[in-house]
Amino acid sequence: MIPIRGAAAGNTWPLVTLGLIAANVAVYLYQLHLGPQGETALFLKGGAVASKLSHLKLLGSSQSLWVAATMFSSLFLHGGWVHLLGNMWFLWLFGEALEDDLGHLRFLGFYFFCGFFSCLFHVLAAHNLSAPLIGASGAIAGVLGGYLLRLPQAPIRTAVFWRLKWETVEVPAFLWLGLWLALQFYGLRRGGTVAWVAHLGGFFMGMLTVTLFTPVRPAAANRKPGKKAGGGRGKRK
């Protein structure tokens, strides 16, 4: 099964989601421009290094401020096309409808909020690790967690190879997100270089805090059944 389209937004363009994707692609093109050695230096400078972050002082120097800033700059660095495309694909699949549900600015704040805490969980779990943490997956994991809480029934258009041909079906979001979550726990058990703790931390932080970023809608009680965010607006032509 391959997810090919997330739930549709309402009448607004997903400007923040598209902007984040464009920014990540632009940074990756800059990485390619630097060459292998320059890219490695950028990872060491802009990536989130747990061993450095775990020794930050509350009132530190400008260098300490820069190290703290890597908890955000690391969200725009990726280790290859596969890493970049995988993250951006999931951001597009699940970001569009959640941005419509929360609103542009709230969604942007939620994205960086989850990215920060996913990095923090990584630092707590691997405080002596000197390898830099890079990638938007922690923030995107928070988007997935928020999506599961806000839009669990939203249809995800999925390509399925069935009866010797590809067919398109709509799968409820909670099934896809449950599968993703199971893979994270499986990866955590097996270990490896992927920051599974950052993924899981971002996901559960997104689930627990998305309501803090949800706008109050006084007219919600007047909505027709099935028109709730992620329910009735989920189909695309």
Image (cartoon, helix red, strand yellow):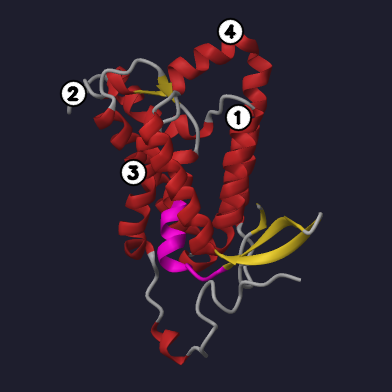
Q: Which residue is mark 4?
A: 37
Considering only order in the chain, which callout, 2 or 3, is on the residue closer to the N terminus? 2
Q: Which element carries disc 3, helix, strand or loop? A: helix
Residue at the disc numbered 2: 57
Secondary structure category for the residue under label 2: loop
Q: Amino acid at mark 4?
A: Gln
Residue 201 is tagged as 3
Q: Secondary structure at mark 1?
A: helix
- Residue flagged by tag 1: what amino acid is it? Val
What residue appears at the point 61 percent right and 75 percent down from the top-left corner?
A: 233
Bounds of the magenta span? Answer: 143-154
Inspect this view and state whether residue 111 appears.
no
Q: Amino acid at mark 3?
A: Gly
Q: Eyeballing the image, is 188 above or below 206?
A: above
Q: How many marks?
A: 4
Task: Tell me the amino acid under the disc marked 2.
Answer: Lys
Which one is earlier in the sequence, the residue at label 1 or at label 4? 1
Q: CA distance from mark 3 to mark 4?
A: 31 Å
Q: CA distance from mark 2 to mark 4?
A: 30 Å
N-terminal label among 2 and 4: 4
Tell me, for residue 119, which label it has, or none.
none
What's the distance in space between the residues labelled 1 and 2, CA to CA? 29 Å
Who's the residue at 36% across and 60% down the image?
210
User: What crowding class fits label 4: few (fewer than 14 Cα within 10 Å), some (14-19), or many (20 or more)?
Assistant: few
Closer to viewer: mark 1 or mark 3: 3
Chief secondary structure of the magenta span?
helix
Residue visible at 51% across and 71% down in the picture: 153
Report the quarter where the C terminus lies.
Answer: bottom right
The residue singled out by tag 1 in the image is 27
Q: From this view, report whether residue 189 is shown above or below residue 36.
A: below
